[in-house]
Structures are given as C-alpha cells and as structure tokens.
Image (cartoon, helix red, strand yellow):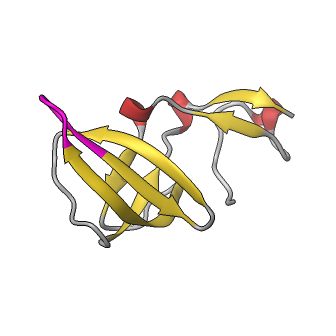
Amino acid sequence: MGRVRLNDEAKVGRSVFAIRPEHIRIQKEETENSLAGVVQSCLFRGEAFALQVRLGNVTTRARLPMLFAHGERVFVQLPAEHLFEVAQ
C-alpha cells in the first residue's frame, strides 16, 4: 500500500499496522507518512465528521472536526506515534 516512517527501527520491513480512526489526519498537502486518496463520504456525526477515504483498493475511516467534499483528493497521514503492529 505504501511506506511509512516508524519510531521503532526494530519494526522496519514488511508488516501490517493499525491506527485508530481519531488519530488519522486528512490533509490537502502531502506530508511524511501520508497516502494519496479520494473522499468517498463525509457525514456529520455530532461533534465530528465521519469520513471514508479510498486509498487505491482499500477504504479507511477517520473522524475529523472539518468537512471535506465527496470526490475531493486528499492525503491520509498516519502519525508514527499512533501506529501499532498487528502482523509481521
């Protein structure tokens, strides 16, 4: 899917990582640990917007305080400090 920079050099290689939706950041510019995607949906859920973003053949979810438009091209940032390994 892509490459990310990790805080723990011992985990470098091919692994599967997970992140909670509230730790995902959606931005309009590319940054470190970001993957290009397209907003599939953006729904207001009380105090935040629930987004679904398509990253190639995978869809990810995020909760944010701001609105993005359906079809908008964005970058999904995965902060290294919030990634945890689930499989190697």
Residue drawn at (32%, 72%) of the image = 71
Residue drawn at (59%, 32%) of the image = 83
Residue 7 placement: quadrant: top right
Residue 38 placement: quadrant: bottom left
Viewer-closest of 42 and 75 = 42
Residue drawn at (36%, 46%) of the image = 25
- In the rendered view of the protein, which quadrant contains the N terminus? bottom right
Placement of 29 over or under 14, stated as above or below: below
- In the rendered view of the protein, which quadrant contains the C terminus? top right
Q: Tag count in the figure? A: 0
Residue 30: x %, y % from top left: 42, 66
Residue 80: x %, y % from top left: 55, 37
Q: Is 31 one of the magenta-colored residues?
A: no
Left or right of 8? Residue 37 is left
Left or right of 30? Residue 49 is left
Left or right of 22? Residue 54 is right
Residue 72: x %, y % from top left: 29, 71
- Magenta range is 44-50
Placement of 13 over or under 31, stated as above or below: above
| Residue 33 visible in rendering | no
Viewer-closest of 63 and 30 = 63
Residue 13: x %, y % from top left: 85, 46
Residue drawn at (41%, 41%) of the image = 24
| Residue 25 visible in rendering | yes
